[in-house]
Image: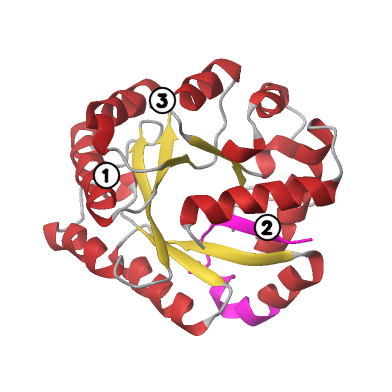
Amino acid sequence: MKLIDSHSHLTYEGLIDNLDEILKQCADVGVSDCIAIGTDSDENNKVVELVEKYEHIYGAVGIHPHNASTYKPEDIERLADFAKYKKIVAIGEIGLDFYYNFSHQAEQEQLFVKSLQTAADCKLPAIIHSRNAFERTVEILNDFGDALPKIVFHCFSGDNKQAEILLEKGFYLSFTGVITFKNAEALRQAAKIVPLNRMLIETDCPYLSPEPMRKQKINTPALLIYTAKKIAEIKNMPLEEFAEEITKTTRSVFSI
C-alpha cells in the first residue's frame, strides 16, 4: 500500500528538525511520498532544498494570503524560477483567507490573481487556500476561464453543496484529518459524493492531527493513514483499494 501526503508543511520547526525519522515512520505505514508546501519566499527556498535532498519529497511554492501585505513583487517572479525545478509540482499554497484577514482583502485578491497567472504560465496545478471566502474564491477562478490551471482545494472543509460546485467546475478536493473529528459529519457526507478520481488526501501537518491522535501536538505525514482509513470506511471499500485509487489521482494531478 502506498499513500501520498499532498500537503505538508515540512519546513516547520518540529518537522524539518526530525525529518529523517519522520520519513522512516512514513515508510513504515505506507506513506511513500510527500508534497512540501511553501507559503513565503524563505519557505520556498527551504522547499527546494528539501526536494533536492530527499527522493520522496516533492514541492509546491507559493505566497500564502496571510503574506499579501508584506510580500515583494520579486517574490512572485521567483515562483516561476522555482517552478523550473523538476520536483516542484505545483504553485501553492495560494488563495484567500477572510477569517483571519491578516492582509487586506483587496491585497489578497491581487496576490491570488498574480499567483494563478504564474501557475497557468508555468503549466502547474494551483493549490488553493480558501477560508471564509468560498464564493469570492470561485468567482476569481471563474474569471480565468479556459486559462485556468488544474485546481486543488486544499483542506476542503465544506458541505455537499460546495463540493458539488467544485466538482462541476472540474476541480479537485483534498481532505485532511478533520474528516475524523466528531463534529465533521457534514464533511463526511461531502466525501461520499466526491469520486476518487477527483479526491486527494493530506495532513496539513503540523496542524490538524486526526483522531485518535488528535492530542498529538505536531501532526506528521505518517498520520495520513488515519484519514485514509476513515474515508475508505465512508466509501465502504477496502483500504488497499482506496489507497491505490487515491494515489493514482494524486500522481496524475501533480505529474509525479
In whole angstroms, how far apart are the C-alphas of marks 2 and 3?
A: 28 Å
In whole angstroms, how far apart are the C-alphas of marks 1 and 3?
A: 16 Å
Q: Give the range drawn in magenta.
A: 1-21
What amino acid type should be assigned to the residue bearing mark 1? Answer: Leu
The residue tagged 2 is 217
Identify which residue, 180 or 165, lies in the foreground: 165
Residue 13 in sight in this render? no
Circle 3: element type: helix
Task: Relative to 83, say whether 192 is above or below.
Answer: above
Q: Residues within 10 Å of mark 3 (few under 14, many from 20)?
A: some
* Quadrant in which residue 205 is drawn: bottom right
What amino acid type should be assigned to the residue bearing mark 3? Answer: Phe
What residue lies at 30% left-to-right and 65% top-to-bottom? 83
Q: How crowded is mark 2: few (under 14 residues within 10 Å), some or many (20 or more)?
A: few
Image coords of residue 92 (percent x, y): 38, 52
Q: In which quarter of the image is the N terminus?
A: bottom right
The residue tagged 3 is 134
- Give the numbered dot on residue 116: 1
Image coords of residue 225 (percent x, y): 76, 54
Task: Relative to 214, say whether 58 is above or below.
Answer: below
